[in-house]
């Protein structure tokens, strides 16, 4: 039986923080290399910043990110972003569509108030099997979750359906992220159908609202999902977008079933945002 997460010692968050920094290594190197890159002023684009969590000591940094983005463009809701990507006349501006994956509790307690205060609509992609779980009560179900959340002790309980309703009422989008945070490439087509349909149906039943946006877990094209099969499968089930973790900007006449997103952490490190802009500079229109 796996051990329970550490509760109190002199390094209570060490495991999770080491894992998070390891996962961030590649993005950190790109950020350093991009430190002097600036955003081209004459291009229409939509950026999709991707976060997974905002821990307590990242709130000020996350707020700084939103203020920085506001200076370089406008915030846009996911429905409007998809409409802009498919607009025959082009996007017609520079926009940021903020996204969060997995559905951990601190996205509500720490990120949501800042998003509301900054009038920044965001999309939260929920792995529905984990809704309402807590580390204290549900360790046996949570510990296989493929993110370093468990090293932070109680910092990474998952959202409840009431939290999702609160986010939806605040103007946020709730999207599907499969039921069990499954890598689509590891599943049969029938299993993919079950994961997409099951998460979509559950969200719609709980929120009494359509769920039409999907983000692939892990999200690397042709590694974590099949670009020839899975976006089309999502479209057939009634989704209007398919979000990946391929970094960079999305230009006019982009494909809403191949949306690029650039991963960020919430601490106030401006090189992260230079990295985001660097990705834009090299992205295809």
Image (tube, helix red, strand yellow):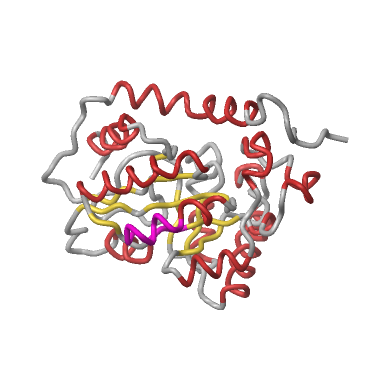
Q: Nearer the viewer, residue 95 or 66?
A: 66
The correct choice, above or below, for 176 with respect to 284 in the image is: below
User: Viewed as shown, does residue 193 lie left or right of 235?
Assistant: right
The correct choice, above or below, for 49 with respect to 267 in the image is: below
Quadrant that contains the N terminus: top right
User: Viewed as shown, does residue 98 lie left or right of 24?
Assistant: left
Q: Nearer the viewer, residue 143 or 230?
A: 143
Q: Write the start and end of the magenta stretch as one range.
A: 112-123
Quadrant that contains the C terminus: top left
Most distant residue in the right direction: 1
**Residue in view at x 62 percent, y 62 percent:** 199
Q: Is residue 163 magenta?
A: no
**Residue in view at x 41 percent, y 28 percent:** 27
| Image location (x, y in percent) of residue 105 | 59, 53
Q: Nearer the viewer, residue 182 or 104?
A: 104
The correct choice, above or below, for 27 with respect to 211 in the image is: above
Q: Quadrant of residue 35?
A: top left
């Amino acid at each position: 039986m796996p051990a329970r997460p550490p509760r109190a010692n002199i390094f209570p968050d060490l495991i999770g923080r080491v894992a998070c920094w390891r996962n961030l290594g590649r993005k950190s190197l790109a950020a350093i290399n991009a430190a002097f890159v600036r955003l081209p002023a004459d291009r229409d684009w939509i950026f999709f910043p991707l976060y997974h969590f905002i821990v307590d000591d990242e709130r000020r940094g996350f707020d700084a990110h939103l203020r920085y983005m506001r200076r370089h463009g406008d915030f846009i809701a996911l429905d409007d972003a998809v409409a802009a990507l498919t607009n025959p006349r082009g996007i017609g501006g520079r926009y940021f569509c903020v996204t969060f994956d997995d559905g951990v509790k601190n996205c509500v307690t720490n990120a949501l108030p800042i998003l509301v205060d900054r009038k920044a609509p965001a999309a939260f992609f929920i792995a529905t099997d984990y809704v309402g779980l807590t580390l204290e009560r549900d360790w046996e179900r949570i510990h296989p979750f493929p993110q370093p959340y468990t090293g932070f002790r109680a910092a990474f309980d998952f959202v409840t359906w009431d939290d999702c309703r609160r986010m939806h009422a605040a103007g946020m989008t709730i999207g599907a992220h499969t039921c069990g945070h499954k890598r689509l490439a590891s599943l049969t087509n029938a299993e993919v159908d079950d994961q997409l349909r099951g998460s979509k149906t559950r969200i719609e039943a709980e929120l009494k609202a359509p769920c039409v946006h999907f983000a692939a877990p892990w999200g690397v094209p042709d590694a974590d999902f099949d670009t020839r099969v899975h976006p089309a499968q999502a479209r057939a089930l009634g989704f209007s977008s398919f979000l990946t973790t391929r970094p960079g900007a999305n230009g006019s006449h982009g494909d809403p079933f191949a949306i690029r997103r650039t991963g960020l952490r919430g601490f106030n490190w401006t090189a992260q945002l230079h990295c985001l802009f660097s990705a834009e500079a090299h992205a295809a229109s």
